[in-house]
Image (spheres, grey):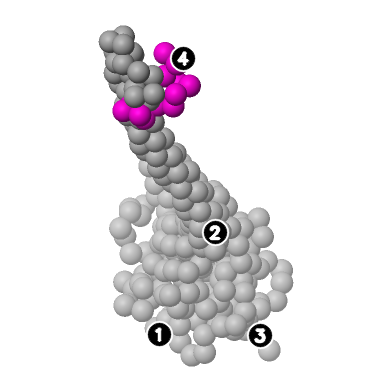
């Protein structure tokens, strides 16, 4: 028989009596102490929060952010994904569409069950409970549906909240979380994945190489043209000087054949002078 976890009758406290930094949540007016996270819990909070925050469709995500769907309730999921709240207005009204809880040693299962029930009742669409003790697994809670358990080889989805699926492994393994975060960040910049970036870099490098080759060809061609032009100019200059000397010799009455022999010009060229 399934045990029913009942939300306690309304207590005396309201969310506006708590301040940022107080280590309490409120369940229907009753304070619930929230102990500081240990090394493993805090590490997974960081990686999971960064991963979800990087999703291309996520505009806001927070760690331990306080949500108050009604005056006597204040809940702070380990990681929350929600529309951007108004800045500087205290506790965030309502609840996040996606909430993630990391359950480590010392987790009160009764408090966790009540928290899940309150969040779903207030409008949270998906709650992922990441079990840090025992086999790697994630419990998926949705309203009016049986809880599902996904193993390390499975994939989580949150349609309408996240664009990309999240592998269960990425919520446990730092390297997998970084790989998925990189993919998300690249998609935010318009690239599908790292392969697309490398492909663009290769194509850009190839085009730049071609342009450099064309520019080098132009420079080499220019230098070669200048060299040939200079040689041609020198040759024409020498011939012009030879012609002037031949004309001077003819003007002094030297024989045409002798002028042709001395100048290197043909007899026809000498006659045309």
- Residue 272 is marked as 4
Q: Nearer the viewer, mark 2 or mark 4?
A: 4
Q: Nearer the viewer, mark 2 or mark 1?
A: 2
Instruction: Evaluate if marks 1 and 4 touch, with contact meaning CB atoms under 8 Å apart.
Output: no
**Image location (x, y in percent) of residue 62:** 44, 57
Q: Quadrant of residue 141?
A: bottom right
Disc 4 element: loop
Q: Earlier in the sequence, mark 1 or mark 3?
A: 3
- Residue 199 is marked as 2
Segment colored magenta: 261-273
**Which residue corresponds to mark 3?**
2
Q: Which residue is at a point 54% across and 59% down the rendered structure image?
A: 199
Crowding near the residue tagged with mark 2, few <14, some 14–19, many ≥20 C-alpha atoms within 10 Å: few
**Which residue corresponds to mark 1?**
105
What's the distance in space between the residues labelled 2 and 1, CA to CA? 46 Å
Magenta stretch, overall SS? helix
């Amino acid at each position: 028989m399934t045990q029913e976890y009942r939300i306690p009758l309304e207590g005396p406290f309201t969310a506006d009596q708590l301040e940022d930094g107080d280590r309490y949540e409120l369940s229907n007016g009753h304070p619930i102490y929230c102990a500081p996270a240990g090394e493993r819990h805090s590490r997974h909070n960081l990686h999971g929060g960064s991963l979800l925050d990087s999703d291309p469709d996520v505009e806001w995500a927070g760690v331990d952010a306080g949500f108050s769907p009604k005056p006597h309730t204040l809940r702070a999921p380990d990681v929350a994904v929600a529309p951007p709240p108004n800045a500087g207005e205290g506790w965030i009204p309502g609840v996040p569409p996606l909430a993630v809880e990391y359950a480590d040693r010392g987790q009160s299962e009764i408090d966790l069950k009540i928290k899940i029930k309150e969040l779903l009742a207030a409008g949270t669409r998906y709650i992922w409970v990441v079990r840090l003790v025992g086999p790697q697994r994630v419990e998926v809670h949705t309203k009016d549906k049986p809880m599902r358990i996904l193993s390390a080889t499975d994939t989580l989805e949150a349609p309408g909240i996240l664009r990309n699926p999240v592998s269960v492994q990425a919520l446990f393994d730092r390297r997998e979380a970084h790989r998925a975060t990189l993919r998300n960040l690249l998609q935010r910049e318009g690239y599908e994945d790292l392969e697309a970036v490398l492909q663009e870099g290769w194509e850009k490098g190839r085009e730049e190489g071609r342009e450099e080759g064309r520019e080098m060809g132009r420079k080499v061609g220019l230098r070669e043209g200048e060299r040939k032009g200079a040689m041609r100019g020198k040759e024409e200059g020498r011939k012009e000087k030879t012609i002037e000397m031949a004309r001077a010799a003819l003007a002094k009455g030297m024989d045409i054949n002798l002028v042709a022999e001395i100048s290197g010009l043909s007899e026809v060229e000498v006659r045309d002078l």
